[in-house]
Amino acid sequence: EPEVTQTPSHQVTQMGQEVILRCVPISNHLYFYWYRQILGQKVEFLVSFYNNEISEKSEIFDDQFSVERPDGSNFTLKIRSTKLEDSAMYFCASQGETQYFGPGTRLLVL
Amino acid sequence: AQSVTQLGSHVSVSEGALVLLRCNYSSSVPPYLFWYVQYPNQGLQLLLKYTTGATLVKGINGFEAEFKKSETSFHLTKPSAHMSDAAEYFCAVSRNRDDKIIFGKGTRLHILP
């Protein structure tokens, strides 16, 4: 069964560093999403992406964040200058009959 | 705006007992409703969803949920709890098929032996 994959599974970075989280959505899907889950809290929507542009973004998705689909398969989330409060699990999802979620990347900012 | 309220951040049931996890939603349009499960240190797995049609929805692992528009509820049930059901359960809502999903705060289900 096709699945959404994410790399890396874990990333530790220093505050102020740039990180890129990678996702490979399911191949024939057209809508892509990033969500995050701060430890012990609910899953929050960050951004949706369709036809090579952002279709919607949340208040969390400020200028420090960007998304890109650099080729036909990858979908990336970049955080330009990480803050301590960016520590969270980041989930990628792609839309088929429903939204399929990847396993997540756990980001720890020190 | 859409929102989800899950009653009870923690629920404990005995193995073999009925599981009932409560969810109420708010939506200005007919909602799409979901239940996701998250096992420790894992991602989100869809248990079941309601879009249109039959209001009683059956999902994986013996779970089911009933959409009650008059009560704006979408409670999750399972007749007989199993130890493997211990996990975090999230109720969620969206406006349509391709829209973002809004999650509730989650309910952690504990199964007592």
Image (spheres, rainbow, N blue to C red):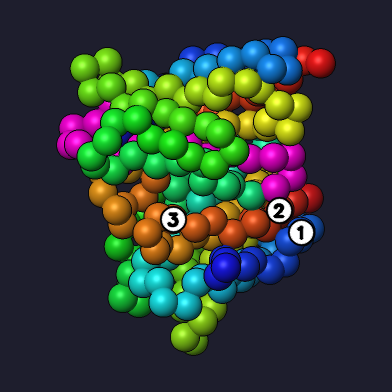
**Residue type pointed to by label 2:** Arg
Residue drawn where x is 23% and y is 39% of the image: B53
Q: Is residue A43 visible?
A: no
**Residue type pointed to by label 1:** His
Which is in the foreground here, disc 2 or disc 3?
3
**Residue type pointed to by label 3:** Gln
Q: Nearer the viewer, residue A103 or A1?
A: A1
Residue drawn where x is 55% and y is 24% of the image: B78
Distance (Cα) linking label 2 and label 3: 20 Å
In the picture, which quadrant includes the C terminus of chain B? top right
Query: Which mark is first along the chain, 1 or 2?
Result: 1
Give, as a single range, the part of the protein colored magenta.
Answer: B25-42
Query: Which mark is first along the chain, 3 or 2?
Result: 3
The image position of residue A40, as x and y in percent, is 66, 32
Report in which chain the residue with disc 3 lies.
Answer: A
Q: Is residue A77 above or below residue B55?
A: below
Q: Nearer the viewer, residue A65 or B1?
A: B1
